[in-house]
């Protein structure tokens, strides 16, 4: 059995992890441990022993030293502009505190979770930044092997890594600004749960502080947070009654819709096209957008769905989920083109309706509206620790080019398939121009064509 010499410096690490200084580094006299603590030293891990020693010594100081590691998730999750969404997040936090933990979703290549309320009902989907496909805490190993073994064949070289959670929230913002109403409300939140994927260090720190709270309450009550550190990620409201688009499209092909229902589907489809094209979604198949079809009188919208959809669109509704691989900083020009899979649907051959043009054209043709949208996105993206303003400007240059093409397609009466075949444009901010609130394309931005094509192209 290993015997610890509690009064010997050699029995403890010189530099403990996490930036915590030992009593010897802070000049604090080592004090004898309590008998129970001595017993626990043989069962606690290395990390917990270091934390335990620090806690035990700080409690004897005349001036208490507070260990500050992280914050409660509640300190971040404030949504004064959207109290309804804030109330949903509060219910999610209450559920976690009462032992109703988020459930990991088996599908997909990243760590994503169904979040529940205290009654166990699913209310949202949480996607932590640290568990994204190439995040350092991704619980699914497939992408890790892709990254290590074949980095040139996997991933998207046109996207900024580990920014998927911002892309999800930004897609919701664009949807709201354009009045499309097809993206379930999504915002950036902070949540902590035992079912999330943490490393051994974070879990050991949490156990050590919980032990301190139980055995040395005077110390434990001073902690800002006792549990696991909150994870930042996107929280998207959960929608019920939807199926994958593939499911309904096959049914509609076998059993054609009535004319009024067909027009509703076309209108919703065009909104999906507008959203995906503006944000340049690089991952839109027919399995990651949803359709809800109700014959008139079959039922009413739930309270949660009515928060983000237009009540008049009650028969056929589309939900654009999985928007985490959007907002590229350049057009795809390496191996793959990442096409929009809806471009091969028969609905894509129909010219944009007057309803869609009336809804969107007046907004996107105003460069001041576009500039305001870019500024709102800037306020969101700059909260990321790895934010790079130069890369963000490149992302906005691609988005402006997409908006410019979409504007021209509306004016020319083009269809979605004709839209995606238009030359790819990048609209960059001119140096020294465009600093005022009122901007014009001629004196504030420079339009260029992106001519380089990916090796495998689709159109």
Image (spheres, rainbow, N blue to C red):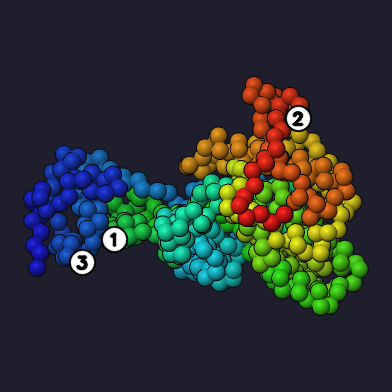
The circle on residue 428 is: none
Mark 2 surroundings: few (<14), some (14-19) or many (≥20) residues within 10 A: some
Query: Mark 2 — residue?
Result: 441
Label 1 Cα crowd, 10 Å radius (few <14 / some 14-19 / many 20+): some
Q: Nearer the viewer, mark 2 or mark 3?
A: 2
Residue drawn at x 75%, y 51% is: 420
Q: Which numbered disc flags the more N-terminal residue, 2 or 3?
A: 3
Image quadrant holding the N terminus, namely: bottom left
* Marks 1 and 2, the one that precedes in the sequence: 1
For marks 1 and 2, give the one nearer the viewer. 2
Residue 395 in percent (x, y) is at: 61, 41
Q: Residue at x 31, y 45 (%)?
A: 66
Element on which disc 1 rests: helix
Q: Is residue 153 visible?
A: yes
Q: Position of residue 447 (x, y in %)?
A: 71, 33
Q: Please tell me which of labels 1 and 3 falls first in the chain.
A: 3
Q: Which mark is residue 43?
A: 3
Marks 2/3: CA–CA distance? 68 Å
Q: Is residue 131 left or right of residue 456?
A: left
The spot of residue 214 in percent (x, y) is 30, 61
Relative to residue 216, is residue 85 drawn left or right?
right
């Amino acid at each position: 059995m290993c015997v610890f010499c509690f009064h010997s410096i050699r029995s403890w690490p010189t530099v403990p992890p996490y930036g915590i200084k030992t009593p010897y580094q802070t000049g604090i006299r080592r004090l004898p441990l309590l008998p129970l603590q001595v017993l626990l030293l043989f069962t606690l891990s290395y990390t917990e022993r270091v934390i335990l020693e620090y806690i035990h010594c700080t409690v004897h100081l005349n001036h208490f030293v507070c260990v500050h590691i992280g914050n409660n998730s509640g300190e971040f999750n404030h949504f004064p502009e959207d109290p309804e969404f804030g109330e949903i997040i509060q219910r999610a936090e209450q559920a976690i505190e009462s032992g109703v933990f988020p459930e990991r979703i088996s599908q997909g290549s990243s760590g994503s979770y169904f979040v529940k309320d205290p009654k166990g009902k699913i209310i949202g989907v949480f996607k932590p930044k640290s568990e994204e496909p190439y995040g350092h805490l991704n619980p699914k190993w497939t992408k890790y092997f892709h990254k290590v073994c074949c980095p040139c064949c996997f991933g998207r070289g046109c996207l900024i890594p580990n920014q998927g959670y911002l892309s999800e929230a930004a897609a919701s913002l664009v949807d709201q600004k354009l009045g499309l109403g097809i993206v379930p409300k999504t915002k950036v939140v902070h949540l902590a749960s035992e079912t999330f994927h943490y490393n051994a260090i974070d879990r050991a720190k949490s156990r050590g502080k919980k032990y301190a709270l139980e055995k040395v309450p005077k110390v434990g009550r001073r902690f800002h947070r006792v549990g696991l550190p909150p994870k930042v990620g996107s929280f998207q409201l959960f929608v019920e009654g939807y199926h994958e688009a593939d499911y309904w499209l096959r049914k509609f092909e076998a059993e054609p819709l009535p004319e009024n229902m067909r027009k509703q589907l076309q209108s919703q489809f065009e909104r999906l096209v507008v959203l995906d094209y503006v944000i340049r979604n690089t991952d839109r198949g027919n399995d990651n957008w949803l359709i809800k079809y109700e014959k008139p009188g079959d039922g009413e919208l739930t309270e949660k769905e009515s928060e983000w959809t237009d009540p008049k669109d009650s028969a056929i509704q589309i939900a654009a989920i999985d928007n985490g691989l959007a907002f590229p900083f350049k057009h795809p020009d390496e191996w793959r083109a990442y096409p929009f899979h809806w471009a091969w649907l028969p609905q894509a051959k129909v010219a944009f309706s007057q309803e869609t043009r009336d809804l969107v054209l007046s907004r996107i043709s105003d460069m001041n509206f576009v500039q305001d949208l870019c500024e709102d996105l800037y306020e969101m993206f700059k909260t990321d620790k790895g934010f790079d303003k130069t890369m963000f400007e490149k992302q906005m240059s691609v988005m402006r080019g997409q908006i410019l093409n979409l504007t021209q397609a509306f004016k020319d009466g083009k269809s979605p398939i004709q839209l995606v075949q238009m030359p790819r444009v990048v609209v960059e901010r001119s140096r020294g121009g465009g600093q005022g609130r009122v901007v014009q394309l001629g004196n504030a931005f420079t339009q260029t064509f992106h001519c380089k094509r990916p090796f495998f192209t689709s159109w």
